[in-house]
Image (cartoon, rainbow, N blue to C red):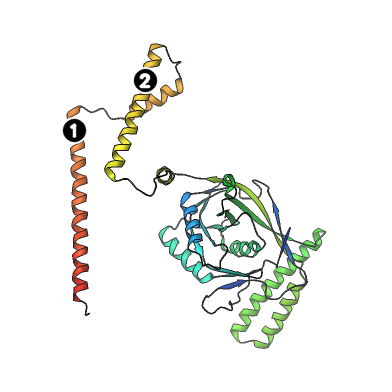
């Protein structure tokens, strides 16, 4: 168990004037602290599993490389959707500036809100599903950040994804967690209900205090604020109980091609279009030869027949249109002409932009 301050988000400006960060910390320290529990329980809670796409991994690694020298880790927001089966599909992410000092966390909430607004203009279907951080597992200060994202997620509780950038265990680099708020020090149900009621009353009182202060009731607002502080201090401490869930690395066809290219030793040299076409045609020819050899072996009785492979081959041949040689050459020629026309128009547009840039640069006063 790791002990950490009570995970209650509170808006307090960071002492650094250069970074408009908001501190995730309780307004008044209590005599007792909370703790965070780490239990490797799979598939517990409402979130059954999490699917992470490769672009999210690349975004996390890129934000870690671009971090400040004083930062030990980076955090960010996860975007995606939640399926009816409770599986969270994480499709995109972005880094959020933060600072950690002495067990206190400062997060740039304004930057986070601006980024989610821009992302939803492009992809309205993607919403906040959780947050990520670099490191091996969960650390005590994650409780404060997780409590903050619990208020940001509208559909379900947030998912916390960790990525071990030190590559200590290559078989377990990425892990997913879910958190649940617990009340500590309440041995019976009534005590727990009382603690929850006191906490809720404190939140309502603070909200009413803010409204009263906005309307001009200074003295009454100060009295209500003190009462809210006493109620919050009397409430039992809370904790975030982290549980590990199943993580699936989801790959689409286009992403799989990119990963295959990056995983090759010569990934620094990207092949041209002709080289890629030549490699694809060669691979297709080898597959056709292998299929033809298999069919010939089955017909000769050298290879045992497999009904499933036969159905796959029949479906593949049925998907190919039946064209004569002249029809295929005409169709191929038309497609080549369309490609050449698009290349010609794109080159004209590129040349026009270059000329406009040159003319604009020449007209500037030196």
Q: Residue at image x 36%, y 20%? A: 293
Q: Residue at x 42, y 62 (%)?
A: 121
* Residue 91 in sight in this render: no
Along the line of sight, the residue nearer the viewer: 118 or 202: 118
Q: Look at mark 2 in the image and give the residue it sits on.
A: 293
Residue 213 lies, with reference to residue 205, above or below; the image says below
Specify whether 94 is left or right of 14: left
Q: Nearer the viewer, residue 364 or 94?
A: 364
Camera-nearest label, 1 or 2: 2
Q: Where does the image place residue 204, in percent across and percent down from the top left? A: 67, 72
Whole-number angstrom distance, CA of label 1 to CA of label 2: 28 Å
User: What mark, if any, has residue 329 been given in the picture?
Assistant: 1
Residue 259 as seen in the image, left or right of residue 179: left
Image location of residue 338, percent across then percent down? 20, 45
The part of the image, by quadrant, that contains residue 202 is: bottom right
Circle number at residue 48? none
Q: Position of residue 49 (x, y in %)?
A: 59, 47
Residue drawn 40% across the image and 44% down it: 261
Please state the horizontal and vertical placement of residue 206, each as a whole percent of the image.
Answer: 66, 76
- Quarter of the picture containing the N terminus is bottom right
Mark 2 residue element:
helix
Say how many tags the image has.
Answer: 2
Please name whichever residue, 320 or 75, is drawn nearer the observer in this view of the structure: 75
């Amino acid at each position: 168990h790791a002990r950490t301050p009570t995970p209650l988000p509170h808006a307090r400006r960071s002492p650094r004037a250069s970074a408009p960060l908001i501190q995730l910390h309780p307004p008044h320290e209590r005599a007792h602290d909370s703790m965070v529990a780490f239990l490797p329980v799979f598939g517990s809670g409402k979130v059954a599993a999490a699917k992470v796409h490769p672009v999210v991994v690349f975004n996390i690694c890129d934000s870690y490389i671009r971090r400040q020298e004083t930062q030990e880790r980076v955090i960010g927001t996860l975007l995606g959707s939640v399926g009816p089966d409770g599986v969270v599909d994480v499709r995109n992410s972005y880094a959020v500036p933060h600072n950690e000092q002495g067990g206190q966390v400062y997060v740039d909430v304004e930057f986070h809100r601006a980024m989610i607004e821009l992302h939803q203009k492009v992809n309205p279907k993607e919403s906040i599903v959780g947050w990520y951080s670099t490191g091996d597992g969960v650390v005590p200060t994650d409780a404060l950040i997780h409590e903050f994202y619990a208020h940001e997620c509208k559909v379900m509780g947030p998912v916390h994804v960790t990525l071990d950038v030190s590559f200590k265990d290559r078989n377990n680099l990425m892990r997913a967690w879910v958190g649940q708020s617990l009340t500590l020090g309440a041995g019976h149900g009534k005590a727990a209900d009382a603690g929850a009621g006191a906490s809720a009353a404190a939140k309502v009182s603070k909200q009413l205090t803010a409204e009263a202060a906005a309307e001009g009731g200074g003295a009454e607002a100060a009295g209500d604020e003190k009462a809210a502080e006493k109620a919050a201090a009397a409430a039992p401490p809370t904790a975030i109980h982290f549980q590990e869930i199943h993580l699936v690395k989801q790959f689409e066809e286009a992403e799989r091609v990119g990963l295959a290219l990056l995983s090759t030793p010569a990934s620094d040299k990207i092949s041209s279009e002709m080289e890629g076409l030549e490699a694809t045609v060669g691979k297709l020819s080898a597959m056709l030869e292998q299929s033809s050899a298999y069919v010939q072996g089955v017909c000769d009785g050298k290879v045992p027949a497999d009904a499933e492979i036969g159905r796959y081959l029949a479906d593949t041949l049925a998907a190919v249109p039946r064209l004569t040689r002249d029809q295929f050459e005409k169709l191929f020629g038309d497609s080549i002409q369309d490609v050449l026309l698009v290349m010609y128009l794109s080159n004209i547009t590129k040349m026009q932009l270059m000329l406009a840039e040159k003319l604009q640069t020449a007209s500037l006063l030196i």
